[in-house]
Image (spheres, rainbow, N blue to C red):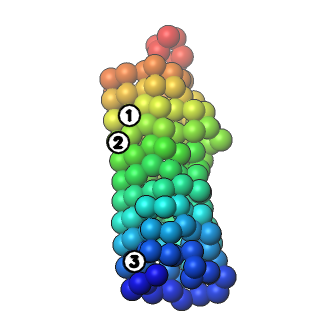
Amino acid sequence: MAANTIIGNGFQQANLANSDRNIVIGYKTAVKSDSNITDNTFIGNNTAAKITNNSSNNVVVGNDSLTTTGSVNGNTILGWNNAPRLTGNDNTIIGNSNGNGLTSGSGNILLGNNILTGAGNMTGNNNFFTGTNVMTGAGNMSGSNNFIFGAAMTAFTGSNNRNIIMGIQAGDAMTSSCTENMVLGYQAAQNNDMFN
């Protein structure tokens, strides 16, 4: 272990064998982290608790965030209880209780509160979700390049790509295989027949 800054209880320095230039602050932060992690900043209680080998360039500030087991790189996570199951890279997550469903997806941006809080797995890439209560009931989703703004898309599942959805409860009828749609306005696209 070399050139690491560690402040807090419940951390085992042996976990950072061959690791360098990490800042770890908080109770049980990076407590079960593995060796060979570099250039990370972890601040908060129980943050980044189980990251594994070769994780680098992550910034995680907030309690109980990024608590999954896996190798992750280039993520920026600010807020409480964000991305507890994340194994993807280069995601930006700002707010509280975001990304419970985000797993192996990469390059996604989540700005707000209670985004992707459903029980399913989100494996899509390069999506932009912003607002409050966005995709809260979503199942498994593998879609990419979607822009969703507002409390919307509770049923969005499967492979949905290149959609723009803006408005409260907009697109709630859209489920799987919806591609290249623009849905704007309160409760727009509530009729499921439009997407079958």
Q: Residue at x 51, y 76 (%)?
A: 16
Label 2: element kind: loop
Amino acid marked by disc 2: Asn
Task: Residue 130: tell me if it is visible.
Answer: no
Q: Residue at x 48, y 38 (%)?
A: 123
Mark number, residue 134? none
Give the residue pinned by disc 3.
Answer: 20
Q: Residue furthest front?
A: 18
**How many angstroms separate mark 2 from mark 3 (CA)?**
30 Å
**How many angstroms separate mark 3 from mark 1 (CA)?**
34 Å
Among the two numbered marks 2 and 3 on one chain, the one whose residue lies closer to the N terminus: 3
Residue 2 shown left or right of residue 25 in the figure: left
Mark number, residue 144? 1
> Relative to residue 90, is residue 182 depicted above or below?
above
**How many angstroms separate mark 1 from mark 2 (CA)?**
6 Å
Label 1: element kind: loop
Q: Residue at x 43, y 31 (%)?
A: 143
Do the numbered discs 1 and 2 sit on residues whose CB atoms are within 8 Å?
yes
Residue 120 shown left or right of residue 99 in the figure: right
Among the two numbered marks 1 and 2 on one chain, the one whose residue lies closer to the N terminus: 2
Amino acid marked by disc 3: Asp
Mark number, residue 126? 2
User: Which of these two is toward me, 193 or 19?
Assistant: 19
- Kindly report which numbered mark, 2 or 3, lies closer to the viewer in this rendering: 3
Task: Residue 105: tell me if it is visible.
Answer: yes
Q: How packed is label 1: few (under 14 Cα within 10 Å), some, or many (20 or more)?
A: many
Residue 22 position, x and y percent, is 42, 78
User: Which of these two is toward me, 9 or 185?
Assistant: 9
Q: Quadrant of residue 162?
A: top left
